[in-house]
Image (spheres, rainbow, N blue to C red):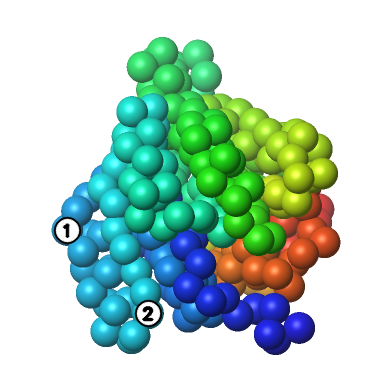
């Protein structure tokens, strides 16, 4: 079991990998021996994360891209093919949120969030599947949300996009299972990412109410989500595909 959690320098591409859950997932994978390819829109954030990882002796590369942009994803996949040869896994973590009731939601904000949360997964999967199929035991992990399984007030685009990611994951598992490609989704609950902490600091989140909804009575740390993502990438999860992994402290039990 433990040996299956180890990797031998295989490339794993993590979008939104400079901070939060993406960074935690990349860290867990690099600690296991993967070469982390962290992707994000801000060069300074990626460079800081790369420096931190390399100081620990981990293998890490960076690539600046907006994965909601089709051309950027194509550039990334071409670069990966030229520099990595094959890719063991991709982790589609990049995402955003916007609070609004549907009748007040602009078309621009609907399309912007759908592009970030859903189109990016389509582009990444489409362009990387040929590379993944060259690897031994390849996998895709799509980071969705508990709100892709249940509803939440004033989050129509987020709930719709993450629900689509959950079911796209299942569909891809059907189409590519016979080729050995595993596809799973992770649905985090409330997680203390930098963005979420910002909501708390601004008084946008009632932490007492949040804790009351979670059976473990606390939000997750990013590392707790990252460890589950890394497990699903690893060969220890070699018979897991099409799964919707709820990592929410029991938030969706009731």
Determine which of the numbered discs, if any, sits on residue 204 in the image.
none
Q: CA distance from mark 1 to mark 2?
A: 19 Å
Work out whether 151 lies above or below 209: above
Q: Position of residue 242 (x, y in %)?
A: 78, 47
Camera-side residue: 90 or 82?
82
SS at mark 2 in the image = loop
Closer to the observer: label 1 or label 2?
A: 2
- Using the rendered view, name the quadrant where residue 67 is placed: top left
Q: Going by the picture, which residue comes out furthest to the left? A: 44
The numbered disc on residue 58 is 2
Between disc 1 and disc 2, whose residue precedes? 1
Placement of 244 over or under 222, stated as above or below: above
Q: Residue at x 42, y 65 (%)?
A: 36
Q: Quadrant of residue 224?
A: bottom right
Q: In the figure, 54 relative to 127: above or below?
A: below
Say what secondary structure mark 1 lies in. Answer: helix
Query: Which residue does the image show at 47% across and 62% down from the upper left?
Result: 11
Left or right? Give the position of 235 relative to 197: right
Residue behind mark 1:
44
Towards the viewer: 49 or 223: 49
């Amino acid at each position: 079991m433990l040996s299956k959690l180890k990797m031998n320098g295989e490339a794993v591409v993590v979008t939104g990998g400079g901070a939060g859950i993406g960074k935690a997932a990349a860290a867990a994978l690099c600690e296991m021996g993967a070469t982390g390819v962290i992707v994000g829109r801000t060069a300074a954030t990626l460079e800081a994360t790369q420096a931190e990882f390399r100081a620990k002796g981990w293998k890490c590369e960076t690539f600046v891209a907006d994965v909601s942009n089709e051309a950027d994803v194509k550039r990334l996949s071409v670069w990966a093919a030229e520099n990595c040869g094959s890719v063991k896994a991709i982790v589609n973590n990049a995402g955003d949120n916007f609070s609004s009731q549907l009748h007040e939601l602009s078309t621009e904000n609907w399309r912007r969030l759908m592009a970030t949360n859903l189109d990016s997964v389509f582009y990444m999967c489409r362009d990387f599947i040929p590379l993944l199929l060259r690897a031994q035991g390849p996998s895709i992990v799509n980071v969705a949300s508990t709100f892709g399984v249940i509803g939440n007030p004033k989050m129509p685009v987020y709930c719709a996009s993450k629900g689509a990611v959950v079911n796209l994951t299942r569909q891809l598992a059907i189409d590519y299972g016979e080729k050995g490609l595993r596809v799973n989704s992770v649905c985090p609950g409330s997680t203390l990412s930098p963005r979420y902490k910002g909501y708390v600091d601004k008084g946008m989140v009632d932490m007492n109410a949040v804790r009351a909804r979670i059976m473990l009575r606390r939000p997750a740390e990013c590392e707790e989500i990252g460890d589950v993502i890394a497990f699903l990438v690893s060969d220890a999860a070699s018979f897991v595909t099409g799964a919707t992994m709820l990592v929410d402290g029991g938030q969706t039990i009731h």
